[in-house]
Structure formats: structure tokens, C-alpha cells
Amino acid sequence: MPENPPMVRFEKVGKRFAGGPSILKNIDLEIEEGDFVTFIGPSGCGKSTLLRMLAGLTPVTEGSLLIEDQAPVEPREDLYLVFQEANLLPWAQVTENVELPLKLKGKSKTERRKKAEKMIELVGLQEATHQYPRQLSGGMKMRVSIARALTVSPKLLLLDEPFGALDAITRNQLNEDLLNIRQRDAFT
């Protein structure tokens, strides 16, 4: 019986911007469905670029990158990238920010609200649903961003150092929270 192909496959992947030096070179990696993978390296080594290539936001310039045997040439519906910054709509309350991906997909207000409430509870922000981003701490903003990502039930969740700018206590708590969420809702 043939083995299932990996969910993500990098084969000799490289990235170069506008003829400049190579940012990434000869990346070979296979990621199975359900894996939890961390890319570690110094600032500027290409971690964010690698995630942006996976998300279909930046093209590969060398080699082959496949997600479920398809090149990520545009953003996928079953993939979500949480950036280093929360990127919340400043004029929208927590619930509206969490609902945004579902609104963009044309889901009904009732369906959006139900899913948003569930994700807000999952990240522990039930008491902040009517607050605006300016009223939230850095950790709370990142929780909103993660709740927003989880509303679309991604098969592949990419996190680009979303806790990097937070204090150590908040960062550790959010790391623990994310691991607990992952146990409930399996994603790669």
C-alpha cells in the first residue's frame, strides 16, 4: 500500500528577492498532517519568508514547495497565517474582529457570531467582547488574532512569532493556551 504524501513538502527550496542574495537555500523538509513544527533562527534568517511562501504570499524562486501536492501560488482557504502584529481593525470590537474571515466568506451573521463566541471563549476573552483594540493589552490583541484564525478551522496554521513582542509571563501563558487549543482542535 502506498504511503500518503506529506501535507507539506519542501524540495531544494530557495528564495531570492530582486536578484539579491539568497535568503533561503536548499530547504528540504516534509511535514506530516498533525505535526507541530517550529523554525528557529536569528532575526533575518528567513523564517518569516518561509512562512509567507507557505501561505502563498511570496513565490518560491528555486525548487518546489507543495501543500497537499499543490503549489501555494495564492492564499488557501484551509490555511491561516497569524502575523507578528495582531493586525486588528481599530474601529471594530473584539467580536467583529474575530468574525472578519467568516464575514469575508459570506457566512450569515448568526453563523459568524456563534463561531466567534466559541473561539473567543476558547482564548479566554469572554469579558472583552465589546472592547476595541486600543482597550486591549498586547497579549489580548494576540488572543483576538488567534481566535480569528481559528474561526476558519484551518488545516494548516502558521504563526509568525505572534508572541515575540510580549513579556515573558504573557508569552509563556499564550504558548500554553495555544498547545491546549491544539489538543482540542487538531491542526498542523
Image (cartoon, rainbow, N blue to C red):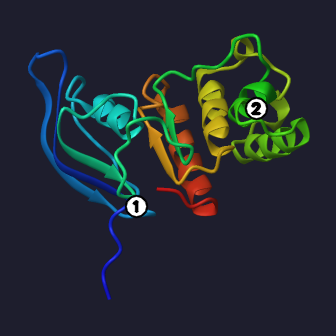
Q: Residue 171 at what x, y percent from top left?
A: 50, 35
Compare residues 103 and 133 and report the one nearer the observer. Answer: 103
> In the drawing, does residue 142 fall left or right of residue 81?
right
Compare residues 125 and 87 and report the one nearer the observer. Answer: 87
Question: The residue tagged with tag 1: helix, strand or loop?
Answer: loop
Q: Residue 182 at what x, y percent from top left?
A: 56, 56
Residue at the location (48% across, 31% down)? 163
Q: Quadrant of residue 15?
A: top left
Q: Quadrant of residue 116?
A: top right
Label drawn at residue 141: none
Q: Residue 174 at what x, y percent from top left?
A: 56, 40
Residue at the location (39% across, 58% down)? 68
Name the N-terminal-most of marks 1 and 2. Answer: 1
Q: Residue 151 at what x, y percent from top left?
A: 69, 43
Quarter of the rendering occupied by the N terminus: bottom left
Query: Relative to 94, does residue 3 appear above or below in the rendering?
Result: below
Query: Relative to 45, does residue 26 appear above or below in the rendering?
Result: below
Which amino acid type is marked by label 1? Asp
Q: What residue does disc 2 label? A: 103
Question: The residue tagged with tag 2: helix, strand or loop?
Answer: helix
Q: What residue does disc 1 label? A: 35
Q: Alpha-carbon neighbours of circle 1 within 10 Å: few (<14), some, or many (≥20)?
A: few
Which amino acid type is marked by label 2? Lys
Number of callouts? 2
Q: Report the Cα–Cα distance between label 1 and label 2.
A: 29 Å
Whether pointer 1 and pointer 2 mark residues with C-beta atoms closer than 8 Å, the reply is: no
> In the drawing, does residue 11 fall left or right of residue 121?
left
Residue at the location (38% across, 37% down)? 73
